[in-house]
Amino acid sequence: MKDTIIELRNQFQEALDKVRDPAGLENVKHTFLGRKGKVAGLFSMMGDIPPESRKEIGKMLNALKSDLSNAVELQSKKFTSAERDKEQIDYSLPGYALHHGSQHPLTKAVDEMLSIFQRLGFDIAYGPEVETDWYNFESLNFPPNHPARDMQDTFYTEGGGVLRTHTSPVQTRYMSEHKPPVRIVAPGRVYRNEAISARSYCLFHQIEGLYIDENITFADLKGTIELFCRLYYGKNVKIKFRGSYFPFTEPSAEIDVSCFLCSGKGCPVCKHTGWLEIMGCGMVDPNVLRAVKYDAEKYSGYAFGLGVERMVMMRLGIHDIRILFENDVEFLRQF
Amino acid sequence: MIVSIDWLKEYIDIDMPLDELAEKLTVAGIECVLKEAGKHIPDGVVVGRVLEKEPHPNADKLSVCKVDIGSAEKLSIVCGAPNVESDQLVPVATVGTRLTPDFLLKKVKLRGVESQGMICAEDELGLGDDHTGIIVLPDDYEVGKPYNDYFSSMMVLDIDVTANRPDIMSHWGVARMVSAITGKTVKKADADPQETGPDIHDIAEVHIAAPEACPRYTARVVKNVRIAPSPEWIQERLEAVGLRPVNNIVDAANYVLMETGHPLHTFDLDKLAGNTIKVRFAEENEKFETLDHKERELSKDVLLICDAEKPVALAGIMGGTESEVNENTSDVLIESAYFSPGVIRKGAKQQQIATDASKRFERGTDPNDTLVYAQDRLASLIRELAGGEIARGMIDVYPEPIESKTATLRLDFVKRITGIEISMEECKNTLSRLGFIISAEDDRSLRVRIPTFRPDVEREIDLVEEVAMNYIDRIPSVSRMSISVPEAYDKFHPFITGIRNFFIGHGFHEAVNNSLLNEKEAENGIWEYTPLKVLNPLSREMDILRTDMIQPLIGSLQSNAAKNAAVYACSNLRMSLKKTTARKHMRKNTITSVLSVPHLCGD
């Protein structure tokens, strides 16, 4: 019995050392000192002890019980005071600095515009940056050796490719692979062989839109563009369509919005006209539909394209396009 | 293309405000801005009368004038001009006038005497180079009136012509557009060449050796002309549209060009060997000196106008120095021809010149009525301005006449594209005002003959555009939200957004880089494949397309090194180039991250 008591003392010490929190301590207390605990178990065995040893064993058991209780009590107090210490943290001390990153204003603008078009039912599509002459020009009704080709100065690559001059080839690529109806927006990078200056860079980003179905008219085009402009520029924006020329749409139009900086009163950004040119659009030319083997008598639709850099520069009041490609962290971290 | 309003009014009545006209033309697809051309005297310059002239007390060559500019107070002005006298009417720049952007006139003391303005010479007002004395004005000028009131300001439309429209590059063409908008009729003067000279066939001959490149060539001759400066009204109009007056022959040709849009050329007939015109392609490396005094080396793509011995002009692009009309010219041969647009474009590209003529020919001029009208008109204008006799008849080599095309316009199709009902009457009116001819019609369709001055119009959809441009404001905005659901949605964008957010969350700044690199940068790629070369780069520094994102990112990293910041780039890069080793890899989407300190990691 004496050995059992010593054994139990060791067991308790071991268990107590492992305790890390008040719940653990409660557990130990319950195991050893509870009504059906190990100490109570030893007391219940007192009946089996020979009378001559009873007094001595009884003394030992009482000592065990009170030692264990004291130890539990002591540990409990430690926990309580630790708890109190915790509450004394000085919340006014400065925290650790968090280094947050930033999204580039160009991709941010693309994301914003894509999400608007997605709400209007457009899916996202992509195309390659290195294109064939057929997709970049011919399929889009640019006749060979026509002045329309001078509208876009082109980079040519080894192997007979061109760096796409617009995202419009995504139209014919997508239509070649999908049956109508198609409703897509295609963001992407395009290249122009123009000297780099504050106003132009050798590449920029466009978002192309295309919707082909039965009975799609210029009125649908107007409706979609108006919705987009209201969602992007705010509900008071005014929109103006004026005739233009693109080989792959007919009729073609340019879209102006009332200047969002001066609300159309005239300011340096809109060159005192009150209007900002934001995109080109039109009804897809039947020659383009035929190039992808769509039935031009059954299907019609519209396409539009906008320059992301232009939009971003107007919005942020940036006058030099090169800033957008310099990646100066002092610039980037503002976004 | 600049169109003078004053000139335009010769062909059409304009009774709406000019800014409204410019706005309506712009909406109809003729993007233009209304501008003031010609002379403009700065505000603040007024007509003044010199009341008294006294010698300057401290300077021999200066005088002090008392000048009345219509106000109660008379100005005291110091003047250095030798010709100033009392009782003259003169232009006076008052204090506060901005004579040039850098020259604001202030009250100054000249040799101790205050001058309250300036009496101006020609050069000071930008009216000429003369600085020998002040301008003395006619007696009927009114004292105190702004001097600018005596200059007729030339209002012009500055038009941005789209690549498909040769017809707009003339006053006639713009008049037709105005007609479509306002409904007024276009007026054309009769050309009326009075042929009083000998038969042209006895004087000159024309041969076309390349009829596919030059389907038609006409020539007229005007004999015994007197070369002189052209009258002021022609000079003013040419200057208003940005052309420099030369002499009456050249100016007349330019005038008819701007009127009709048809480019013409005039040769000194005496300098054409054998009095012959021959149209042929150049030999490889053939040499020729053009009007701009450049010795040019030609390729076989360049079409030439030659005489019996030598080239005399780059056909449809620019004339030569030798056969140029000059002060000694007596007989003039007028060329009015039609050249194939592709041929002129190739030639002009190869020689890297763009002229008023080449810009029109490469878009496509009218081989029929306009060509002949321009020929007749120029002959009669030369006769009017330079005298002489027009030879009888016109040489006209036109082996295979170019016929006008026809197309059918269905009202239902107009509605299917525009979304609105445009009536038969409206379609007919718009088209005929633009010069189209309705050859037949039934209930719901029109048979339309397309004039040959509109080579850009061929199909029904082209006719729809002609009509729709006039009603673009009437088309309503319709938003039908019956969405057709695609079979599968794009998964790439959400994927890339996730990656981007991860990096931004870890403190990276997204970079967007130039994807054109130099060879050295390209070597830093982490993939093993041949980079793709650009054949016509902006510079050697940018002749290779990046193969992955790490290369330009290292550059961004270096430029930001001092700032100790993390940068990342995340983008997709795809390409398709058949039979290129690069293809397989370039199709991959590449995502790269770069940590500035302490190491690089790429993925």
Image (cartoon, coloured by chain):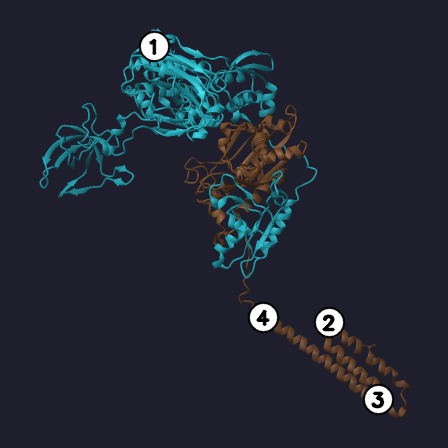
Name the residue type under label 1.
Ile
Chain under callout 1: B
Comparing labels 1 and 4, the label whose residue is closer to the camera: 1
Question: Are discs 1 and 4 located on one and the same chain?
Answer: no
Give the answer, above or below, for where B384 lies relative to A66. above
Name the residue type under label 2.
Ala
Report x, y in % for residue B311: 39, 22
Mark 1–mark 2 Cα distance, whole angstroms, equals: 119 Å
Question: Are discs 3 and 4 located on one and the same chain?
Answer: yes
Residue that numbered label 3 is attached to: A57
Name the residue type under label 4.
Ile
Residue that numbered label 4 is attached to: A89
Tell me if label 2 and label 3 are in contact, CB under 8 Å.
no
Q: Would you say A274 lies left or right of B45 here?
A: right
For the N terminus of chain B, the quadrant is: top left
Residue at (42, 17) in percent of width and height:
B278
Residue that numbered label 2 is attached to: A23
Report x, y in % for residue B116: 18, 38
Residue B357 appears in view:
yes
Element marked by disc 1: strand
